Image (cartoon, rainbow, N blue to C red):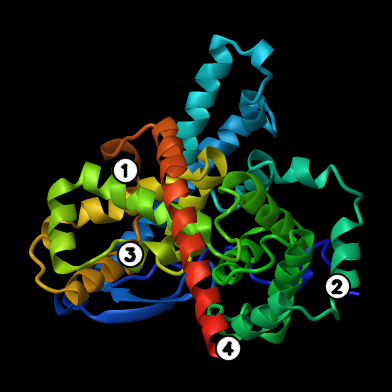
Amino acid sequence: MHKTERKTDLPLEYHERPMLRTSIHARRANIVVKFQDPYGFMVEGNVDDVNILNDVREKMREQEKVWWAMEASKGVNWYLQTYASSAALSFSVLVNAMALKKLIRKGIPPALRPKVWFSLSGAAKKKSTVPDSYYNDLTSAVQDRVTPATKQIDHDLPRTFPGHPWLDTPQGHAAVRRVLVGYSFRDSDVGYCQGLNYVAALLLLVMKTEEEAFWMLAVLLENVLVNDCYTDNLSGCHVDQRVFKDLVTKKCPRLSAHLEALGFDVSLVATEWFLCLFSKSLPSETTMRVWDVLFHEGAKVLFNVALAVFKMKEEELLMTHHVGDAIKIIQDTTHHLFDPDDLLTVAFENISFMTTNLSKQRKKQETVVMAELDQRLRRLNTSKLSVTS
């Protein structure tokens, strides 16, 4: 029987690592360095990137002091006090909610992240609705069953962050597999979709137990994101890509026209962002900072962040002449966004759109996408009939 109570089977936690020091000669030489980040991932960057990461760690230490001070003055679970019933809403509650929103956008300290995510996301509440033994009973009952979902999961495990010191081990693979297989039986409509392996893996690195990672995945798929993002036909993902393309056109019209002239569709890069929730594209701490806001504010955050990447490199992208050049600029940008504040400042201070408008756009595009998927399915069935006749 596998254990899920403590971190004994999840040995990798956020670890403070000593600051990397570089000489003036190294800075001038622009030496490329490799080092392990706090979550165990090997990072390659130049000396400027190292200096940025050191600054980020220092900022997070200061942010941690703020959070601990809030706990000391307002109580251990002070951040839950902003979620009063509508009847009890008051000016002070609204002020606290706005302060919490601002604080979360500045980053939840790694040491507090597991419990804050678990509480604010609704995962703790979701877990409380079932018996304590739910996760262990579920994973024990399905561990030997074989389905198309379990076959795909087994195929994807070795490709999930290869080289990571814990995830890419038999123990790491087993933990990711239990979470994903367990969820595939909990929600057969979703089952398993490629991309969820990266999401589950990062959740395991952050949360204190395997069981908590499972419930975070559950609340993410059932409450935080739209409920059709990971279905068989990926209809929700197709809808999101169309909505995002419209947003780029509205917020960056010159860039949108230029990319269209190149034959560049934003889905070339954004599909992976939305399916993997940026876990394959951004440095780990930057991804965590995006998820801090995602679990508090919802799926609109993905659109803010995706749009910010294009906005940050708008002028450079306008100078491109080939699709490949545009893709390289965007990928190089996301892989080296070591300072989360650079990205999130653009995402939340320089870009704004109404969530209600986002919902309207989704409904509008949903009709078009479903019609196209239905037409595609009919063509497929017709071609199958032609082959067999």
The mark nearer the N terminus, 2 or 3, is: 2
The x and y percentages for residue 239 are 44, 53
Foreground mark, 2 or 4, reads 4
Q: Nearer the viewer, residue 311 or 38?
A: 311
Q: In this orientation, which residue lies closer to the viewer: 330 or 382?
A: 382
In terms of sequence position, does the residue under pointer 3 or pointer 4 come before the other? Answer: 3
Visible residue check, residue 27: no
What residue did someone put label 1 on? 345
Q: Quadrant of the C terminus?
A: bottom right
Question: In the drawing, what numbered circle is on residue 383?
Answer: none
Q: CA distance from mark 4 to mark 1?
A: 60 Å
- Looking at the image, tell me whether mark 1 or mark 2 is earlier in sequence order: 2
Q: Which residue is mark 2?
A: 142
Who comes first in sequence, dot 4 or dot 1?
1
Write down the residue under mark 3.
334
The structure residue drawn at horizontal position 31% and vertical position 60%, both measured from the top left corner, is 52
